[in-house]
Structure formats: C-alpha cells, structure tokens
Image (tube, helix red, strand yellow):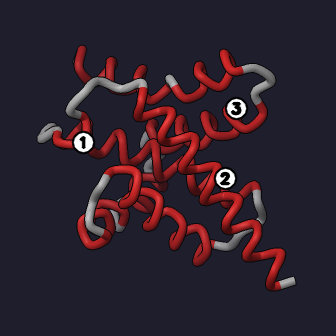
Amino acid sequence: MHNDHGERVEGVRKMALQFLAEAIGQCPAGLESSSNRDIVFAVLGFQYGAVQSAAYVAGLGEEAASGIVEEVVSRINGMEKESALKFLELMPMLAGKEYPPIGIGGRAIISFYNAASDGEKMSAAGSLQEILRQIEES
C-alpha cells in the first residue's frame, strides 16, 4: 500500500508540473518577476488550488498535498522553498475566504486532466491567463 501512495504522490507531482508549465507558458513574459502582489497571489493561488485539487482527487491527505504544493510551486516558479512557503502559508486562509484563483485552479486542473483534445487542455490551462487579464483591467 505504501508503494501505491508513493505512485499517487508522483502522479500528482507530474500532472501538476505539466499543467502548471502549460498554464504559465500562456501567460505574459516577466510574470515570474512581477512586483504586483495581486498578480503574485493570483498565480500562486491558482497553482495552490490546482495541486490541492489534484492531490484530493488522487486520495492523498493534507500532509502529502502540502509537500507536493511546496515542491511544485517553488520549482515551477524558480523560487527558493523558503520564499514559496511564505506565500503558501497564507493559502489555507485565502481558501477559507474562497479566494477565486484557488477555486479556478482546482477546477482547471481537473478539466485539463479530463480533456479529450489538446484544444480542451489549452483552454483549461488558459484560465490563469484570464485571471491575470482581469487583474490588469481592474
């Protein structure tokens, strides 16, 4: 059973990295160095929601999900784990307040996983771009 757990953790990690690389690849250049805190929180919230949702669907507990989120978010954004942790510590509170990017990220990764075509996958991954467009317009 422990091996099954390890396989699920690895599966969630791989799927989250693939999905988030696709989502970030569709975003404007310079996203990783943005000093706009709204954008930073939206991107990290989206990523957090996506990884948490994938872990939940895979039947992983909170501890395993947290470990995957830390690794994936720091890796995909090129951040030191300590920097990523500072932002991620706020995500459960934001999730409790139903911060929209978290829910959107969670739904988007499930749509990405269930997509029947590359176009559907691109559409699911593009939801991060839509969030950022709305922030820029406000």
**Mark 2 crowd level (few <14, some 14–19, many ≥20, 10 Å Cα):** many
Marks 1 & 2, CB-CB < 8 Å contact: no
Rendered location of residue 46, percent (x, y): 45, 42
Q: Which residue is mark 3?
A: 111
Q: Earlier in the sequence, mark 1 or mark 3?
A: 1
Residue type at mark 1: give it: Glu
Residue annotated with mark 1: 32
Which numbered mark, 1 or 3, is in the foreground of this view? Answer: 1
Give how far apart the Cα atoms at labels 1 and 2 are: 23 Å
Residue name at image x 49 percent, y 62 percent: 69
Q: Report crowding for label 1: few under 14, some 14 to 19, many 20 or more residues within 10 A (C-alpha).
A: some
The x and y percentages for residue 128 are: 44, 29
Q: Of marks 1 and 2, which one's residue comes earlier in the chain?
A: 1
Three-letter residue code for mark 2: Ala
Q: Secondary structure at mark 3?
A: helix
For the N terminus, the quadrant is bottom right
Mark 3: which amino acid? Ser
Picture quadrant of residue 56 = bottom right
Quarter of the rendering occupied by the C terminus? top left
Relative side of 94 to 8, left or right:
left
Element type where label 1 sits in the image = helix
Q: Which residue is mark 2?
A: 54
Q: Is residue 30 left or right of residue 58?
A: left
Which SS class for mark 2? Answer: helix
In this rendering, is residue 112 above or below 73?
A: above
